[in-house]
């Protein structure tokens, strides 16, 4: 395995970490208008993610930076093709940040309601766009022989990519509900259990169809064999089904573990289906960007590997310590 292959795997790991951690952030945000019954419960929901949401977004920054350094051709084509989509994602993320910071600046119920809905819509919007954008890399985008994106914003949308976006929204909402069952108490926790059970069916159906369709797309549009993409896809379906079972049995910790596993396996299925390509060309398959033709020079990858070996364990330890410190359940009182 070359260093370019190693960095492709590491970028997949970074996206998995981002979806895993930011996924329940987004899920909690989507549920904000529906679960709490009073201001104290709304504050409790926000406090479950308050200490960690901004740290979770670091995974996205690192994933983007690693792509830029390790695969500059991939970064250039992807960011030019998905430019408007990325602007919309940034807008959603900015709205979420403002909702956290500005919601408590006034006691007016209308003011707080506006920012509560802003958080919910920003969370759902970002999840939807990430699903559409990442799945379009596999489904295919118009790329010419020079590796330049030649399409428009609307080329991102197809039946498959729209389903991917909706499935990610449903999975994140389910993930957020299971997170609340292990982080809250009392009536709010009970309503989180109910929400998890209700969301589980939609998440399993949409996620299952998306994973199966991903394997089909990989074979038909990316010249892949059924194996290995079918392995993470099957494991993802199994994890989602187990999450449903645990949610109905009120096994909160296991339900959250399974939604976390399903989220990671969705990313694993996408990246496994892509390899050895990083972007599939819909105009001419020969124009597709691959791990080899999109990567940086060997020396650059060596330097990046040394830096990653030294720095990543420190970041992981710090973030793990943060979650350990804020592990207690949050009460509405």
Image: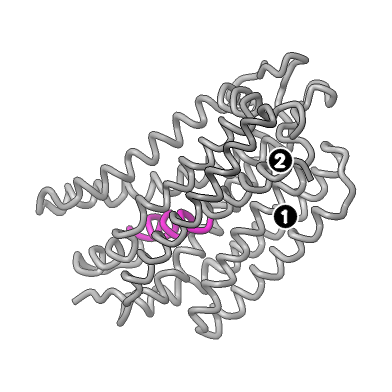
In the image, residue 67 lies at what x, y percent? 58, 35
Residue 225 inside the magenta-drawn segment: no
Lateral position of residue 234 relative to residue 201, left or right = right
- The residue indicated by pointer 2 is 3
**Circle 2 Cα neighbour tier, 10 Å, few/some/many (<14 / 14–19 / ≥20):** many
Relative height, residue 265 to residue 119 (above, below): below
- Compute the Cα span from label 1 to label 2: 28 Å
In the image, residue 278 lies at what x, y percent? 71, 35
- The residue indicated by pointer 1 is 211
The furthest residue to the left: 107
In the image, residue 140 lies at what x, y percent? 74, 31
| Residue for point 67% across, 16% down | 150
Relative height, residue 327 to residue 39 (above, below): below
Residue 27 inside the magenta-drawn segment: yes
Lateral position of residue 226 relative to residue 25, left or right = right
**SS at badge 2:** helix
Relative height, residue 178 to residue 230 (above, below): below
Q: Closer to the camera, 77 or 58? A: 58
**SS at badge 1:** helix
Choose top left, top right, bottom left or bottom right for residue 35: bottom left
| Residue for point 72% across, 20% down | 143
Q: Closer to the camera, 276 or 274? A: 276
What segment carries the magenta color?
20-33
The first of marks 1 and 2 along the sequence is 2
Magenta stretch prevailing secondary structure: helix
| Residue for point 45% across, 76% down | 194
Q: What is the count of numbered marks?
A: 2
Is there CB contact under 8 Å for labels 1 and 2? no
**Circle 1 Cα neighbour tier, 10 Å, few/some/many (<14 / 14–19 / ≥20):** many
């Amino acid at each position: 395995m070359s260093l370019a292959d190693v960095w492709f795997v590491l970028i997949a790991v970074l996206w998995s970490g981002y979806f895993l951690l930011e996924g329940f952030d987004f899920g909690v945000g989507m549920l904000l208008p529906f679960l709490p019954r009073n201001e104290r419960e709304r504050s409790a929901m926000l406090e479950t993610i308050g200490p960690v949401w901004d740290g979770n977004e670091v995974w996205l920054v690192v994933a983007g930076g690693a792509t830029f350094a390790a695969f500059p051709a991939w970064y250039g084509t992807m960011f030019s093709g998905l430019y408007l989509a990325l602007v919309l994602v940034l807008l959603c993320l900015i709205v979420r940040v403002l909702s956290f910071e500005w919601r408590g600046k006034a006691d007016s119920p209308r003011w707080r309601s506006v920012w509560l809905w802003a958080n919910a819509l920003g969370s759902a919007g970002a999840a939807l766009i990430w699903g559409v954008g990442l799945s379009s890399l596999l489904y295919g985008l118009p790329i010419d022989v020079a590796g330049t994106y030649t399409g428009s914003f609307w080329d991102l949308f197809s039946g498959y990519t729209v389903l991917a976006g909706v499935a990610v929204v449903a999975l994140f909402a389910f993930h957020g509900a299971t997170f609340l069952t292990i982080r809250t108490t009392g009536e709010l926790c009970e309503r989180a259990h109910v929400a998890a059970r209700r969301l589980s069916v939609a998440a399993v159906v949409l996620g299952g169809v998306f994973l199966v369709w991903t394997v089909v797309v990989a074979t038909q549009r990316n010249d892949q064999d059924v194996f290995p993409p079918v392995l993470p896809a099957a494991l993802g379906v199994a994890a989602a089904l187990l999450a449903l079972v645990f949610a109905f049995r009120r096994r909160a910790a296991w339900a959250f573990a399974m939604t976390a596993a399903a989220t990671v396996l969705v990313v694993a299925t996408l990246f496994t289906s892509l390899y050895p390509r990083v972007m599939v060309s819909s105009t001419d398959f020969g124009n597709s960007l691959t791990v080899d033709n999109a990567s940086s020079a060997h020396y650059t990858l060596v330097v990046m590997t040394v830096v990653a070996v030294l720095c990543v364990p420190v970041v992981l330890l710090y973030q793990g310590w943060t979650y350990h410190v804020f592990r207690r359940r949050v009460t509405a009182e």
